[in-house]
Image (cartoon, rainbow, N blue to C red):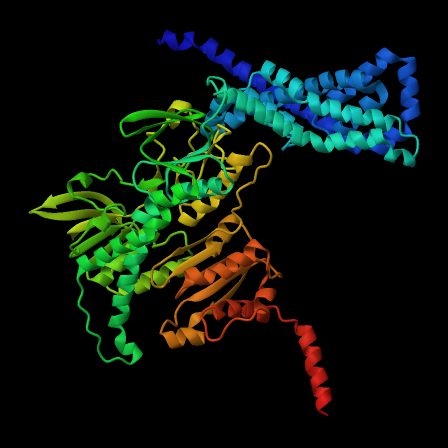
Amino acid sequence: MNFSRWAILPDALRVNANLLQTNVSRWALLVAIAALVTVFFAFDLQHYLTLETLKSQQAAIEAYRTNHPGLAIVVYALIYIAVTGLSLPGATILTLAGGAVFGLVGGTLIVSFASTIGATLAFLAARFLFRDAVESRFGDCLGTINKGMDRDGALYLFTLRLVPVFPFFVINLVMGLTTLKTQTFYWVSQVGMLAGTVVYVNAGTQLGKLESLSGILSPGLIGSFALLGILPLLANKIVEVIKANKVYAQWAKPSSFDNNVVVIGAGSGGLVTAYIAAAVKAKATLIEKHKMGGDCLNTGCVPSKALIRSARLLALMRRSADFGIEKAEVKLNFADVMSRVQAIIKAVEPHDSVQRYTDLGVEVIEAEAKIISPWEVQVIAEGEPRIITTRAIVIAAGARPFVPSIPGIEDIGYLTSDNIWDLRELPGRLVVLGGGPIGCELAQSFARLGSLVTQVEMAPRLLIREDAEVSEAVMAKFRQEGINVLVGHTATGFIVENGGKILLAEHDGKELRIPFDRILLAIGRVANIQGYGLERLGVEIAAGRTIEINEFQQTNYPNIYACGDVSGPFQFTHVAAHQAWYAAVNALFGSFIKFRTDYSAIPWATFTEPEVARVGLNEQDAQAKGVVYELSTYHLDDLDRAIADGVAHGFVKVLTAPGKDRILGVTIVGEQAGDLIAEFVLAMKHNIGLNKLLGTIHIYPTLSEANKYAAGVWKRNHAPKGLLWCAARYHDWRRR
């Protein structure tokens, strides 16, 4: 006989008995709470917790308090504890009543303790009733939350108490599901709610003095309610100071500063930041360790558009017969094309040069920067270390191409958007790994220049962020031009075999071997967040491996800002410049006024043929977010100028709010889509509807008329049928 099994039986029975007892207790508590809440609403007890009842019973309440002062305090406190503990409505009126009945000091003391006790009871009830069930179902997510609560739970709770973004009863219940200690919850709640308690109790003292309607205009009452309006602003400021003191605690702040702002990185974001600082006569230093102009000038926007232009001209000349020209002779020298790209960079370079910014009054240092404290940046220029003190720092360190860890990748001499511009010999067989904007633009350009291009994308289509019909239009054009588009293919490895390079890809469970001469990696970019001191300071990093910023472009250090690719959420040159304005202004004037970054109308374009441009929502985004919309589409094969130019393909697609002409988003596919979208960006930014756009004169014949005609589609779909019927009858009558 196995006695060990019998030996553990009493323990198992004891555990099961305890579990059963706990479950019974939970059900008993839940039933009791439900019964009390039911009684509260069934007997309309909330009627007694209104301002009208408070005023009508003011004399009786005052008399009771005078005759039974101790009992009045106990009864009032118990009622307050019950209301907050059961998460019932009426706490605000009870707080005002506390001021009216017990005065400012007495009311504040009673309300402060009663509200905190009631909140703690609600906290404990939620913990006892629901935490085990929530942990068993959402353990992973809750584990992450609890780590944050263990680290900064007191500060989180204090912030929520001081700045009531969420109702207090919700905070009580949700906090009960975390690992926050009960004593911490109690004292933080007591302190955090005190300021609001004082303001509301003070307002109650003024209500207590209200004898007639004319008393509403009394200075005391007006002042009390003014305090209610000012409280959130004051609370926000207090929270900011507390957070700042915590994050700056270990650092010694200089007594004076060399600079108003130091900017790290001279790409689009950094250049705009420095320019604005110089424009408002601030002392600014701009530090760049590589090349002025950043990725956009040297390896991104400028060279890619120069290459696209050359490739597009070549493609247009191949269509000479479409324009009535029997034959156009073309002789391509790829090295000359790439030399032109470099010449374009040189031509644009002065706009972003050291000389230009020096002339503006910016100190430009070409060296590597390292942040050594919230107010100090070290550079080593000409072999000499130098420490620059500054009131604010703006990080605009940009991003770099992402290189995946695919087996064999280090053996095949891959290209990225950084080094592809060094090519002087056209690749015979080029594989482009990635189907985003960069991959698509360069795949089409090299195919037009003569490479045999295979584009490999693991997603089911190219340009996955765009609508399916947009992707289909681009893929159809690519295949027409000879690009081998392989979607739904995952790169699994690289091998070198008999001197040749081969990409191994998986598709529908089968392996595909793709030979190539050169491969371009275009599968995204990663923010530059290492190597210049973020780790030393503990600057917070977001889940997407970008610098965590708030709506003002601030990091967790209030005087350190970030903009552009290094912070996201959009990796576009124009967005970096847009964010830089907010970073610069907030860094320089944030002590007096701060501006939230406006993302209401962010456009972007992919410069393939057909060109793709978008602002706001497209259909797949709207559907994912549950946004209801109406659709108006105008096809460019009907546009006179597009027909005349031989580019009669594509469409303008506008999403609007149901029954209204308010624009939610626009997608344009076709010639000069990136230019045409600007009208809709302006319309969305300034709340201009399609009716006004339709009433705006557009030059004939131009491609921009497509925007007006798209508005016309919306108008036809919303024609007033009843009014038109009446008009038809009227005109019939006039003809008789």
Residue 653 position, x and y percent, is 48, 63
Q: Residue at x 80, y 27 (%)?
A: 203
In this rendering, the count of numbered labels is 0
Left/right placement of residue 719 relative to residue 446 reads right
**Of residues 667 and 503, the one drawn nearer to the viewer in this rendering:** 667
Q: Is residue 604 above or below residue 696?
A: above
Residues 541 and 6: in front is 541
Q: Position of residue 638 (x, y in %)?
A: 45, 75
Residue 329 in view (yes/no): yes
Q: Is residue 634 above or below residue 559?
A: below
Quadrant in the picture for the N terminus: top left
Residue drawn at (39%, 41%) of the image: 358
In the image, 386 versus 163, the foreground residue is 386
State the image coordinates of residue 212 (x, y, percent, origin top left).
93, 33
Q: Farthest front residue? A: 359
Picture quadrant where residue 568 is located:
top left
> Relative to 18, is 83 above or below?
below
**Depicted 667 relative to depicted 395: above or below:** below
On-image quarter of the C terminus: bottom right
Q: Quadrant of residue 367?
A: top left
Point out residue 489 in the picture as x, y percentages from the top left corner. Answer: 27, 50
Q: Which residue shows up at 37% across the image and 61% down it?
A: 611
Most distant residue in the bottom direction: 736
The answer to whether residue 511 shows anywhere in this view is no
